Amino acid sequence: MQSEWCGAEITPLEPDPGHTGGGNGAEAPNHLDLFSPACPGEEETMRKVVLALFLLVTTTLPTAAAELKGRVLASDTGKPLAGAKLEVRELGLSATTDGQGQFVLEVGAQAQLTLVVTYPGYYPVNQRVTLPAPALELSLAPVRPFTEQVEVRASRAQTGKDPATFTNLPRERIEESYYGQDPAMLLAATVPGFFAYNDNGHGIGYSYFTIRGFGQARTRVSLNGAPLNDAESGELFFIDLADFLATAGDIQVQRGVFGLSGMGGAVDITTAPASMEPSFQLHLGAGSYNTQRLTLRYDSGLVGGQWALTARYSKITTDGYRDQSWVDMWNYFFSLSHFGQRSRTRLVLFGGPEQTHLAYYGIPKSVLEGGRTGNADRDRKFNPLTYPGEIDNFHQPHFQLISELRLSPNTELTQTFYLFQGDGYYDQFKTNRKLVEYNLPNITLPDGTVIRRTDLVRRRTVDEWDAGWVPTLSWQKGNWALELAGELRLHKAHHYGQVTWAQYYPPGVPPNRRYYDYQVDKQSSALRLKASYRLTDDLLAVAGLGYAHHRYELSKDRLKGQAFTDNFDFLLPQAGLLWRVKEGQEAYLNVARGMREPNFRQLYDPQDYYGTRAYLDPEDVWDWEAGYRLRGERFSARVNAFYMRFANEIVWAGALDDSGVPIYGNGARSVHKGLELEGSWSPSPNFGVDAALTLSRNTFTRYREYGYDGTFTSYDGNRIAGYPDTLLLVTARGQLAGFQAALTLRAVDRFYLDNTQDNRKNPEARRQPGYVPLVNPGFAVVDLTLRRPLPELATTLGLSQLGAELRVNNLLDKKYTAFGYVDYGEPQFIPAAPRHYYLGFSLGL
């Protein structure tokens, strides 16, 4: 074949598969010089044609492809991460790992590129890669949930590190037991040694708890490390946190003195860690006594490998079991998390208003038995607070900033900054009250009659704020571990009371007369150093020393003109040993001192017309603990004994004041001792049993209660009121035919209603006709929970999840009273609801 171009003859070469250089039987040139002039005068034309051909070839022919391959592993387990996402920033390419964590990316001839690897629950990896590159092995570190690290240092005990008695309640157990009830009621059904009751009778609304016989005012309660107890009274108001457990992470309940905890123990609640996956969840529930619950939750998932947002809105309403014990509350929750390579930070905002018709008074036995109308079922629901306006209104928004910073491989700083405000009031109807007690003059009628008493409505208002800082600095190297924990809390509150209505209101007196008006400041600070040293591979010694300072300041007492400052300083030592007997078994011994200042109104009560300045000593307790833990593949068990000796104990006197708050006395010496056992057994993945038993004895060794005339009553040797000797919890759970079921038995021994131990030293009183024992009878209650995930229906409806749950509380329909007290010698009882139900549905997008 021949071609003709400017008279030149071009002969095509034959193929040369053997690369021998032959072809056509003639010697061929190695290259063709296209830039040599082909024809005279046409050099410039030749160059343009060649350049065009070069550009055409280089832009249309494929470039030799480069492969980037490797695998992605979890750094903590070494296992492959299937479904990890990989992105090449410069090229916009992406891929996911297969079941073995392997990946292959066609990345072209790019010399350098940036590879970003992400996986839910793990820190992202940004790696610069130079091509060509060998097979990569990328390790992703897990994002440790805040519940494991950030807010747990100062306030939490840790298995294998602390010789302490505590119970951890994981998120799964909370979800299993929670339907919107007060947190205290949930813990009473899940934690050993924890006793609680509820004003409304069915678990939603005002609730109160004790641990080892110590009321909630003596138990430190914290949320993400920040204290929740009222700074002045030590009391706790979970009702201000409606549906909070819907976004809780886990809960730790400590019993006894640990760290900077309260006298009887501590409860630490964490908010749930940020979800690594985006989701939207809805829960709708309804139950007995017109109970309704709505929960909406949104999770952004991990955004940009660093940020995550959680937001929740909840509303709970109920009529309550007892008459006029309704509750109407809503709550918001907002959490913004940032994950860095050496730090984690969370901004948490939550709060919401509540309205509750109060129901804190009990009823006598005669009413329980139908003495009002002849219908016992009807009468036991009676609420003595019949005034429709006896309503509590309160709003307490919280702001928290939680931070963790790893300063070095051995050193970590965790901090919680917090601020919360409280603003609210409640109204009370009071009969036959002295006018002078309410800063009102007596009324003289035209006929000379003097009116000194009246029925009235009073309003008690508080406007307060608390701010604080809870830092913990921890260091660990070799056999040593040191922890320096601190706390700073500032509190300021303005209290005032008004008479909003009176049957006889003095003429000429402005409306809403104030009968008390004062301001209280309190400053609290604490510092604790704890050192741990591993004496041997199996023996750990722990010692700590804490210092706490509390300062009350009363100022601006506008009616009585009182002003004072009271200071309390405590030195709190602790020492213990933790012995690993063998794998899965450990024993511990611990001794610690706890102290607590009196609450403000025990020192002086500006709200009481007759109140005078009191000088009380702080409580002082030495706590001895010994325990043994056993863990196996399918079971765990724990047994511990405690002995707590108190001096100057501030004890409940067996009565309530006219706001429903327990009345306390000072100067007692007492001993709290007992045995606590708990265990779990899971013979198969579909069945498990948890059990807990508490056996205790709380006794005064010396206590005198003095009357106004100087006489006293001795309670030496008597049992302390308000707490049973025996508590039993058993929960069996299983899965069958797609259902998840849990059956819980809660048995509570009888307990005394006041410190006379049912008039132990006055047998004559017990022999009087019609005598009602000052004892709350023991009771046993069974609760049933059925949950049914509906994955097939969820897939059909395009949902990520769908489920239903049915809860039957008090399954056996027992009529019992959950608590009681004594009022002017007559026992009063708080009834609990008979069988009642809750039905809920949950869905996710």
Image (spheres, rainbow, N blue to C red):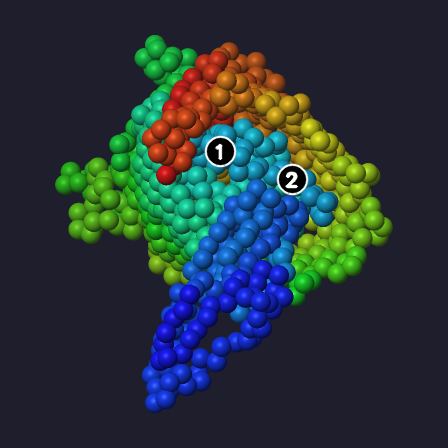
Task: Give yes or no for contact between labels 2 and 1 (Cβ–Cβ under 8 Å).
Answer: no
Rendered location of residue 582, percent (x, y): 82, 38
Dot 1 alpha-carbon crowd within 10 angstroms: few under 14, some 14 to 19, many 20 or more: few
Give the image quarter of residue 831: top left
What residue is disc 1 on? 175
Query: If the image is split into quadrants, where does the N terminus sit?
Result: bottom left
View extreme (top): residue:
374
Please indicate whether residue 766 sits to the left or right of residue 840 in the image.
right
Please indicate whether residue 745 sits to the left or right of residue 282 in the image.
right
Rendered location of residue 669, percent (x, y): 67, 40
View extreme (right): residue:
536
> Is 758 above or below relative to 447?
above
Task: Name the residue type under label 1.
Answer: Glu
Q: Which mark is residue 675?
A: none
Rendered location of residue 409, percent (x, y): 67, 63
Rendered location of residue 684, percent (x, y): 64, 23
Dot 2 alpha-carbon crowd within 10 angstroms: few under 14, some 14 to 19, many 20 or more: many
Q: Residue at x 37, y 74 (%)?
A: 4
Dot 1 falls on a residue whose secondary structure is helix
> Is 837 above or below relative to 306?
above
Q: Is residue 238 visible?
A: no
| Gap in angstroms between the C-alphas marked 2 and 1 | 20 Å
What residue is disc 2 on? 166
> Is 794 above or below relative to 132?
above
Dot 2 falls on a residue whose secondary structure is strand
First in sequence: mark 2 vs mark 1: 2
Q: Nearer the viewer, mark 2 or mark 1?
A: 1
Q: Residue at x 50, y 67 (%)?
A: 13
